Image (tube, rainbow, N blue to C red):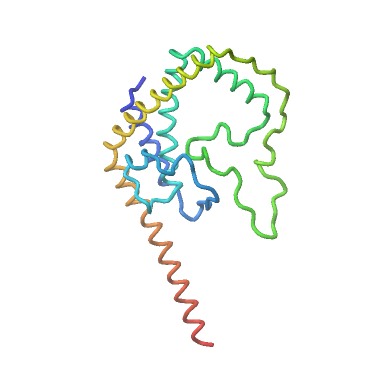
């Protein structure tokens, strides 16, 4: 299995293959702050500036975040039996929650709104969010934990958090090495689309102004 450096390189390679398919005109505006991307050290490590569109950043940040999450999951499964048991119980309860439209999405779409914003006067017949919970069933009651078990579980959670921090640091350091090709791709594929959009907007404003001057 690839180490951190190899997994980061592979994630960047996949993002570079995806980026030419992204079009600024098809990006949906967000109505909520993205908790995955806002203030993310991964964005800084990648060299993303404030002008890089959120979907472009999100697609890479999501894939890099998955590396950290997978590493923590592997560490937990091997070393933290109490936490692993609680996670398995949580996963079992989630299976009883029915259809969850945000589950199982590729990293480019994780954490994003599952439905576009409706247009005024044209409501949707149904939404994916509205279908959430379809097929839900009753889950078995959760077993209570003793005080000793709670203390041990908190200790294992602290160890898991430390694994996430150390892995996150290693991932960001590895990602810095790929800044040149990330920056080159953004300059070549994204910035021309932004410039064309801004140019079209100014042409539209100038056209409105010239027509207004005729009346």
Q: Residue furthest bottom?
A: 215
The percent coordinates of residue 139 (x first, y second) are 69, 21
- Up the image or down, 130 lies above or below 135; here it is below
Total numbered labels: 0
Along the line of sight, the residue nearer the viewer: 35 or 1: 35
The percent coordinates of residue 200 (x first, y second) are 44, 67
- Figure quadrant of the C terminus: bottom right
**Residue at (50% x, 51% y) in the render:** 27
- Up the image or down, 150 lies above or below 20; here it is above
**Residue at (46% x, 52% y) in the render:** 23
- Up the image or down, 187 lies above or below 160; here it is below
Q: Is residue 139 left or right of residue 85?
A: right
Along the line of sight, the residue nearer the viewer: 209 or 32: 32
Along the line of sight, the residue nearer the viewer: 184 or 101: 101
Question: Which quadrant would residue 101 be assigned to in this image?
Answer: top right
The percent coordinates of residue 203 (x first, y second) are 44, 72
- Figure quadrant of the N terminus: top left
Q: Is residue 195 left or right of residue 144?
A: left
Q: Residue furthest front?
A: 147
- Up the image or down, 38 lies above or below 169; here it is below
Q: Is residue 68 left or right of residue 94?
A: left
**Residue at (46% x, 21% y) in the render:** 157
Q: Is residue 32 left or right of residue 131?
A: left
Question: Which quadrant would residue 121 be assigned to in this image?
Answer: bottom right
């Amino acid at each position: 299995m690839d180490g951190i450096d190899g997994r980061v390189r592979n994630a960047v390679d996949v993002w570079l293959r995806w980026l030419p398919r992204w079009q600024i005109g098809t990006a949906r505006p967000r109505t909520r702050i993205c908790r995955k991307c806002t203030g993310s050290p991964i964005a800084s490590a990648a060299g993303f500036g404030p002008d890089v569109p959120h979907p472009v950043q999100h697609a890479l940040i999501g894939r890099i975040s998955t590396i950290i999450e997978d590493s923590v999951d592997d560490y937990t499964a091997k070393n933290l039996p109490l936490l692993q048991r609680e996670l398995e119980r949580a996963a079992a309860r989630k299976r009883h929650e029915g259809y969850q439209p945000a589950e199982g999405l590729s990293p480019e779409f994780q954490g994003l709104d599952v439905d576009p914003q409706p247009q005024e006067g044209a409501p949707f017949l149904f939404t994916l969010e509205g279908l959430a919970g379809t097929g839900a069933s009753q889950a078995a009651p959760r077993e209570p934990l003793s005080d000793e078990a709670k203390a041990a579980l908190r200790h294992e959670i602290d160890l898991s958090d430390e694994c996430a921090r150390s892995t996150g640091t290693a991932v960001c350091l590895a990602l810095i090495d790929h800044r040149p090709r990330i920056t080159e791709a953004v300059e070549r594929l994204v910035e021309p689309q932004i410039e064309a959009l801004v140019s079209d907007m100014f042409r539209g404003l100038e056209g409105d102004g010239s027509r207004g001057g005729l009346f």
